[in-house]
Image (spheres, rainbow, N blue to C red):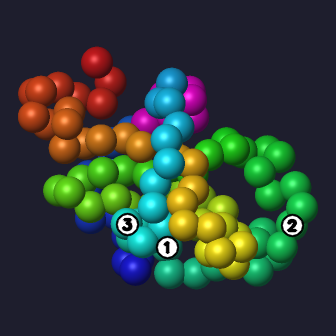
Amino acid sequence: MGDARPYDDHGFSVADWAKVSPRQVRLTDLTTIKRTLDLDALLADDSTFYGDLFAHVVRWRGEFYLEDGLHRAVRAALQQRLVIHARVLDLDALQKMGGSVHE
């Protein structure tokens, strides 16, 4: 668990994230970048109504960082699920290709 992104701001917008296809990510592979959990948001029935249905994960230096979706991950763990569906921005792959996130 961390309290900040260990990587530089990638500048991805909501529209950019929407272009990333969701995939399954094991909960045990995730490192959260948030220290606090809002219990009201965790227990809300409509917690994903206004946001993305999928968590946002950034892969950087071989680690998977949960950037958005902590409440989804906790709910999944409480339901004894092993994975969540997430959109994964792979900064490692982009760096290997010599690209940037907005190409």
Q: Earlier in the sequence, mark 2 or mark 1?
A: 1
Which residue is the site of mark 3?
29
Q: Earlier in the sequence, mark 1 or mark 3?
A: 3
Q: Horizontal and vertical percent for residue 86?
A: 53, 47
- Quarter of the image with the N terminus is bottom left
At x 24% / y 53%, what residue is drawn? Answer: 60
Residue 10 badge: none
Q: Is residue 64 magenta?
A: no
At x 56% / y 29%, what residue is drawn? Answer: 18
Which residue is the site of mark 1?
34
> Label 3 vs label 2: CA separation?
25 Å
Identify the amino acid type marked 3.
Asp
At x 48% / y 67%, what residue is drawn? Answer: 27
**Residue 86 sits above or below residue 42 on the image:** above
> Label 2 vs label 1: CA separation?
19 Å
Q: Horizontal and vertical percent for residue 12?
A: 43, 36
Q: Horizontal and vertical percent for residue 40?
A: 82, 75
Tell me the crowding category of disc 3: few under 14, some 14 to 19, or many 20 or more residues within 10 angstroms, Cα based: few
Which residue is the site of mark 2?
44
**Residue 9 sits above or below residue 96 on the image:** below
